[in-house]
Image (cartoon, rainbow, N blue to C red):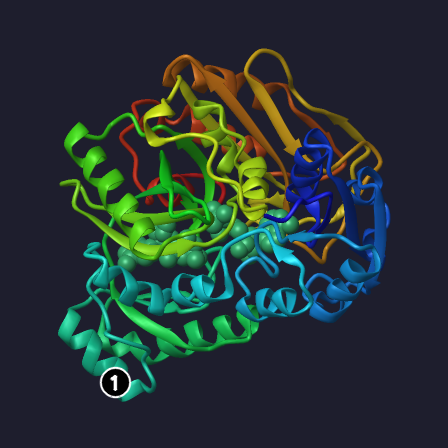
Amino acid sequence: MTMIQKVLIANRGEIAVRIIRACRELNIKTVAVYATVDRDSLHVKLADEAICIGDHRLENSYLNHNAILQAAVNTQVQAIHPGFGFLSENADFVRACERVGITFIGPSADLIDKMGDKQTARETMIAAGVPIVPGSKGLIHDLAQAYQVAQEIGYPVLIKATAGGGGKGMRVCYDASLLEDAFNQARQEAFNAFNNADVYIEKFVEGPRHIEIQILGDKHGNSVHLFERECSVQRNNQKMIEEAPVQNLSSKTRKKLYDVATKAAKQVQYVSAGTLEFIMDKDENFYFIEMNTRIQVEHPVTELITGVDIVKEQIRIAEGKPLSFKQSDLKTNGHAIEIRVNAEDPDQGFRPMAGTLNGLHFPGGNGVRIDSFVYQGYKILPFYDSMIAKVIVHGSNRDEAMEKAIRCLEEIDLDGIKTNVDFQLEILLNQKFQDNVYDTTLVQTLLKGDKHV
Ligand code: ADP
Ligand code: ADP
Ligand code: MG
């Protein structure tokens, strides 16, 4: 058992703030690290200590292993929480933490190797008997192999970066004549975003839903699932709105999802918080697409319906404590919806926007949670992800949660910066969303049909 008394948070933005708040409630001291341009960021203000680790370039700051480890050693923390993105699924960084005797709040480097890389995860899941999307057996090394594999699987196919995340490094291909471009573009985008151009090929499932299962495992071999989330509101394969639990799902499929996820967690002896992501077709056939071996952006919807604080549980698990509950202790209560608020302009192809937030009003009231890091006068920077807030609502049922979400987006006021709020409101008011009969093509359909093209 490691007693964790001080944690370094190797991230920024709302997730850094989220983690600092959990630590504070647990009486754990916090150390923020920040890039020079981030000195006015809320995570810097809220942490007990803050260390500047480099300039705005990611490799110099939030991806700078040495600077972060040096800050951790100097401030004598016992543990590092990576948040999401950045170093959260970087096995080399986890090994470096292990070498200097600092606990990484997340799975071991070996587990990340096994599950964090998509192609390897597919192989691990096959061994665990989990259904996966039909696709290539391993990485695709050249164009000739790509043609052959795509032919075998049958078009349309999806070329995917093995290191992918946030919807990047993915290209659909409907026809062999377009394969060369798709293959090259996917590789190039993957290399730019992840410094790894490796790709594999999957069958492209048309109009699927994205359904995922949250799991938690401790270092004593216990694991549980925390039910499911629907994340089918997506633009460019990136989630925009998430909800939990999934209402329009047969109990048979739901149970099968839980069984598969629990079996997978046991099979790999998963430790910490993780998510198994699936796509599901109209007949409720589902296929594993990837595992996220970290806390996720949408974790709050699960927290609201289960009452479990997933970040606190991650910390307890890292300390070596057993899970604080058994599967049979867990129940869902009501319905939760999360809306990602991004500083971006829907009228300019969702181009990220930087600038000063002159005025700010966040909605509140019964069943409303805001996870954010912006404040009035804060200058939104062009160097980082455009997500600036998450509005999360909880109601006794889906309709009530939806009404609350609509009310919140009508009330929110972000002055001085363009955001996706009106577009998100349009989605919430869309009949298909209201009737709960939507899939991952919903946003694309909306964009085709109106002014936002
Ligand atoms: P990322 O790491 O970027 O999150 P994922 O593999 O989770 O990548 O895929 C992101 C999204 O892309 C999915 O939620 C889904 O909407 C879409 N997608 C992924 N794989 C497929 C597939 N084989 N067929 C159709 N859509 C897919
Ligand atoms: P999730 O898989 O948690 O649903 P996404 O894949 O949509 O979330 O987005 C998470 C991605 O956001 C990360 O993998 C990374 O590319 C990017 N990201 C990294 N750091 C941050 C941050 N501080 N705030 C928002 N997004 C971030
Ligand atoms: Mg994903």
Q: Quadrant of residue 171?
A: bottom left
* Amino acid under disc 1: Gln
Q: Position of residue 144 (x, y in %)?
A: 26, 88
Q: Position of residue 430 (x, y in %)?
A: 38, 27
Q: Out of 59 and 190, give the one closest to the viewer.
A: 59
Is residue 349 visible in this depiction of the protein? no
Left or right, 224 with reference to 401: left
Q: Out of 288 and 232, give the one closest to the viewer.
A: 288
Badge 1 element? helix
Q: Position of residue 417 (x, y in %)?
A: 72, 39
* 358, above or below 441, in the image: above
Is residue 32 visible in this depiction of the protein? yes
* 236, above or below 30, in the image: below
Would you name the residue on which mark 1 appears?
Answer: 145
Left or right, 117 with reference to 410: left
Residue drawn at (24%, 66%), measured in percent from left and top?
A: 174
Left or right, 109 with reference to 397: right
Q: Out of 326 and 304, give the one closest to the viewer.
A: 326
Left or right, 437 with reference to 171: left
Residue drawn at (78%, 33%), measured in percent from left and top?
A: 375
Residue farthest front in this picture? 1
